[in-house]
Amino acid sequence: KAGVTQTPRYLIKTRGQQVTLSCSPISGHRSVSWYQQTPGQGLQFLFEYFSETQRNKGNFPGRFSGRQFSNSRSEMNVSTLELGDSALYLCASSPRTGTGELFFGEGSRLTVL
Amino acid sequence: GQQLNQSPQSMFIQEGEDVSMNCTSSSIFNTWLWYKQEPGEGPVLLIALYKAGELTSNGRLTAQFGITRKDSFLNISASIPSDVGIYFCAGDPQGGSEKLVFGKGTKLTVNP
């Protein structure tokens, strides 16, 4: 069974640009969550989606947005990038909602210059 | 916001030794989970705990959900080199969601 696939794996952007990250969950998983990982703040929750609906949102500015498609694939977008947005963005899928049992992808490492 | 205080930050042990790490919070969590992350990978779920007082094992790993619902510990017995990685505790404060709060991690180094 294929795992969670995230693209791109690495990307470099400059301040002010925007970025879109993509996530394909494990087949059959309808719940998708996104986390930001930085050395200083650790793992922080961004969004949670189930059946194309955002169920929860973390404490991030409105520049961070996401969506889920009918095939459970998800994207997140960060607009007007800032240096502090440099991080590893992790997507996770879950076979059941509400268990915290997350299957993470390898992440998309974003560097903002 | 809610925080999980995880300790120790790092551990250097000899192969074969037992390891213990823990996580505490000032507020109640309804679910406790332990994840392990290796370089270049996303975290991998090790153990999930759903009831206060619950003690669960997964091979050489044992974890407990504290009776006050404000703490959890993870023990690794007879460590081996492949146990190297960063171990994270995580909790769901509201219950029934994937909105987890993560500890800052315990970095484990095992000397052969």
Image (cartoon, rainbow, N blue to C red):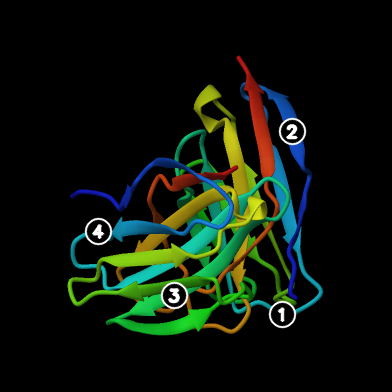
Chain letter, disc 2 residue = B
Q: Which residue is mark 2?
A: B11
Q: Residue at x 66, y 27 (%)?
A: B109
Q: Can residue B57 be seen by looking at this rendering?
A: yes
Circle 4/circle 1 CB separation < 8 Å: no
Asked whether A10 or B104 is in front, the reply is A10
Mark earlier in primary sequence (3, 4): 4
For marks 3 and 4, give the CA distance: 15 Å
Asked whether A40 or B86 is in front, the reply is A40
Chain letter, disc 3 residue = A
For marks 2 and 4, give the CA distance: 33 Å
Q: Which mark is residue A48?
A: 3
Q: B24 above or below A86?
A: below
Q: A48 above or below A7?
A: below
Give the crowd class for mark 3: few <14, some 14-19, many >=20 residues within 10 Å.
many
Q: Which residue is mark 4?
A: A26
Chain letter, disc 1 residue = B
Where is residue B18? Give x, y as percent: 67, 34
Give the crowd class for mark 2: few <14, some 14-19, many >=20 residues within 10 Å.
some
Q: Residue at x 65, y 50 (%)?
A: A83
Q: Which residue is mark 1?
A: B28
Chain letter, disc 4 residue = A
